[in-house]
Amino acid sequence: MPEEKKSRWQRFKRFLKRNMTPLWAKRFSYQVISFLVSIAMVFGVASYAFNKTYEETELKFVDDFTITVHTGAFGTPDNSLEFIEKVIKSDADMLEVDVRQRPDGTVVMGHDIITTNSAGVELEKAFELIKDTDIKVNLDIKDINSLIKLRELVVKYGLKERVFMTGIEPYQTDAIKDKCPDIPYYINYSPSRFKIFSESYQQKLLDLLKKTGAIGINCNHRYSSKPLSNMLHYNGYKLSVWTVDKKYNMKRVLLNQPDNITTNEYDLLNEIIDNWGK
């Protein structure tokens, strides 16, 4: 009978069993551990160097810089009244809520598709809590069908000067201009950190912003850069960056001088700002 074909892993284990003496095993284990320790040291030194370099650069902010507390921060459920109350009790300036609409037209806070008339917390209840505070609101639009009634709520609670919208794709901006013409909004976009050095690429972004009527670009922190920020600010536009939760990324993004940073780790971000360079 022909011998059953063995996998590479099975053949490797058989080789070790036949050839690995106690002394050889000890030396091999030592080499593996030494290699892993060396890798950890390299990453540790590199991380320290990067962080040190960042903090040696002066930290500057644009006028009206804001930090948006991402919905569900402070250990609360996403898009909940508990989250709203927690932010109000903090020293935060701005919070984020996801905006959707129930089948019956009620505007609610919710990230996922709303399929019943009982799902989601009514946005009006959140605005009721916010109206007598100085808290600003980053409205992350998940359903453009909610726009007409959303604007009605914003006007009703006197929040027009305290809100802006994100989550808007470029193809949705005609609906935004039609239904919420007096509420500022960013467009979602993922700019190239390499092409941004090209004048033609910069002009492409500027043409898009002019066409869409947006106040600026809202992008994941991976796509933010100082050249992008400089170009936008020079031409009268803004940069909003999401969702920045790790220390290293916070330092990099802060040096890009965005207009808004959205984070789940509000306290950590403020700690970095307060202790910058110390």
Image: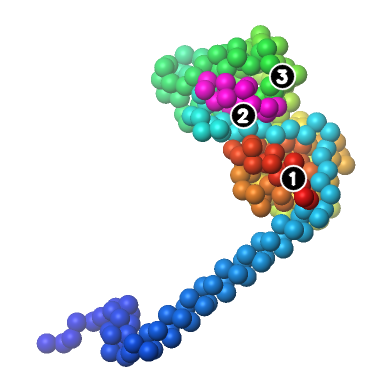
- Which residue is most to the top? 156
Say what secondary structure mark 3 lies in.
Answer: loop
Residue 217 in the image, given as x and y percentages of width and height: 72, 39
Question: Which mark is on residue 96?
Answer: 2
Spatial separation of the CA atoms under disc 2 and disc 3:
14 Å
Does the CB distance between marks 1 and 2 fall below 8 Å? no
Query: Sequence order check: which comes first, mark 1 or mark 2?
Result: 2
Comparing marks 1 and 3, which lies closer to the viewer? 1
- The residue carrying mark 3 is 134
Report crowding for label 1: few under 14, some 14 to 19, many 20 or more residues within 10 A (C-alpha).
few
Residue 150 in the image, given as x and y percentages of width and height: 61, 17
> The disc labelled 3 sits on which kind of residue?
Asp
Spatial separation of the CA atoms under disc 1 and disc 3:
26 Å
- Residue at 43 percent across and 21 percent down: it is 119
Q: Is residue 157 left or right of residue 227?
A: left
Magenta stretch: give its range.
81-97
